[in-house]
Amino acid sequence: MIYAYSCKGCGHRWDVTKRLAEIDRVEPCPECKSEDSMRVPHTSGFTTSESLGRVKAPSEFRDFLKVIHKNTPGSKMELD
C-alpha cells in the first residue's frame, strides 16, 4: 500500500510503499533525515464501470441473462 507522510520538522511530504504489517515502522524524512514524521490521512479514489468507459449491456441482453440465471441452479451471478 502507498502511505503519505509529512515531516513535522521541515514540512516535506513524501509517499512510502509498504505492507500493512509495517504500518508502525518509523519513516525518516528524506530531506532533513528527522524521524519526527507523521502519516497523512487520505481518501481512496473510487471508480465505476462507466467512468472507465465501459457501456452497460443492452436491456434485452441483461433480460436474457436473467432468464439463464433463473434457470441455472446454484448460479451466483449478480445481475442487478
Image (cartoon, rainbow, N blue to C red):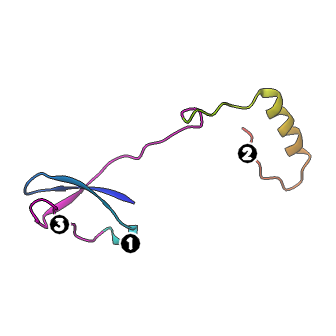
Q: State how far apart marks 2 and 1 are (Cα).
A: 33 Å
Residue plotted at (82% across, 32% down):
61
Secondary structure at numbered mark 2:
loop
Please give the residue where the numbered disc 2 appears in the rendered image.
Answer: 78
Above or below residue 35? Residue 38 is: above
Q: State how far apart marks 2 and 3 are (Cα).
A: 46 Å
Which residues fall within the magenta stretch? 24-51
Question: Identity of the amino acid at label 1?
Answer: Ala
Of all residues, the one furthest to the top in this rendering is 59
Question: Identity of the amino acid at label 3?
Answer: Pro
Q: State how far apart marks 3 and 1 are (Cα).
A: 18 Å
Please give the residue where the numbered disc 3 appears in the rendered image.
Answer: 28
Q: Mark 2 or 1 closer to N-term?
A: 1
10 Å crowding of disc 1: few (<14), some (14-19), many (20+): few
Please give the residue where the numbered disc 1 appears in the rendered image.
Answer: 21
Residue 22 lies left or right of residue 70; in this view the side is: left
Q: Main secondary structure of the magenta part?
A: loop
Above or below residue 5? Residue 65 is: above
Magenta-colored stretch includes residue 31 = yes
